Amino acid sequence: MKIIMLGAPGAGKGTQAKKLAAKYDIPHISTGDIFRANIKNGTELGQKAKVYMDQGLLVPDELVVDLVVDRFKNPDCEKGYVLDGFPRTIPQAKALDEALTKNGDSIEYAINVEVPDSNIISRMAGRRACVNCGATYHLEHIPPKKENECDVCGKGLILRDDDKPETVEKRLNVYHEQTQPLIDYYQGKGVLFEVDGTKDMDEVFTDIVNLVEV
Ligand code: ADP
Ligand code: ADP
Ligand code: ZN
């Protein structure tokens, strides 16, 4: 099963992608997580990506595409994967198509998680991520069982630097300009599916499962 999650920053792509990955036993591939891991480990890629991420800008396509295409070579991708945060531009989508077509593959579901901009700022302000395992929570909507402690691994939770309101606004603009056109792109390919991301996390998940299991 090859799935792409589309949607604004904070729409709930990561939350749903993790649930899909667990249910269907496929890897969750988040380019944002890959960049953050590289930053944490001080790699050259991390240093380059950080400059853009801190400003709420997209990392240049040439730093992203090979990374993802290489990741597909891992045996865990044999049954498929759920892509979260990639592709984010039309050139990335085209590069992905090209790489897949070479192997006679294609994306089966591009799921657009719809959340209006007015909800996004509070989604991001309340988002907390585990410093260790990347699990995400929301202070009001999806709180951890113990304050400031990850349910999964017990480590601390932080507000991402780029989730501060000034940067979120910038990221939303970037989303509308560069990523939203992907909705039409995948619609044109006949693989676009939409879900209402303002519903409760579990309801959104049920809606997605109903889409991919028909
Ligand atoms: P969110 O979960 O809020 O949508 P991500 O974790 O996916 O954010 O991405 C964080 C940042 O990493 C982005 O703002 C961007 O700078 C960079 N990034 C992640 N994926 C991509 C990509 N496919 N292309 C370009 N930049 C990316
Ligand atoms: P994205 O990957 O699209 O940037 P996340 O999955 O990280 O988004 O979700 C953004 C924030 O909103 C997180 O704090 C998350 O816990 C919370 N969240 C996710 N889904 C929902 C939902 N259906 N209702 C309320 N809050 C949600
Ligand atoms: Zn954790």
Image (cartoon, rainbow, N blue to C red):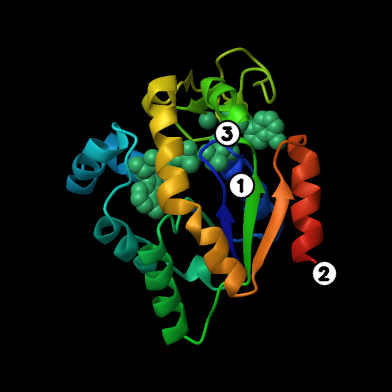
Q: Residues within 10 Å of mark 1 (few under 14, many from 20)?
A: some
Residue 152: image location, x then y, percent? 60, 31
Residue highlighted by disc 3: 117
- Using residue 99 as the reference point, say whether residue 191 is left or right of it: right
Does label 2 point to a residue whose CB lies under 8 Å from ligand 2? no
Q: Residues within 10 Å of mark 2 (few under 14, many from 20)?
A: few
Q: Is residue 152 something one can see in this rendering? A: no
Q: Residues within 10 Å of mark 3 (few under 14, many from 20)?
A: some
Count up the numbered dots: 3
Residue 111: image location, x then y, percent? 64, 57
Give the amino acid at mark 3: Asp
Residue 119 image-quadrant placement: top right
Question: Is tag 2's residue or tag 3's residue first in the polypeptide sequence?
Answer: 3
Residue highlighted by disc 2: 214
Question: Is tag 1's residue or tag 2's residue first in the polypeptide sequence?
Answer: 1
Front label number (3 vs 1): 3
**Residue most toward the top?**
147
Q: CA distance from mark 2 to mark 3?
A: 30 Å
Question: Is tag 3's residue or tag 1's residue first in the polypeptide sequence?
Answer: 1
**Label 2's element?**
loop
Residue highlighted by disc 1: 18
Q: CA distance from mark 1 to mark 2?
A: 21 Å
**Label 1's element?**
helix
**Residue at image location 46% in from the left, 52% down from the top:** 179
| Frontmost residue, 160 versus 134 | 160
**Residue at image location 19% in from the left, 40% down from the top:** 47
Answer whether labels 1 and 2 touch (C-beta < 8 Å). Answer: no
Residue 15: image location, x then y, percent? 62, 41
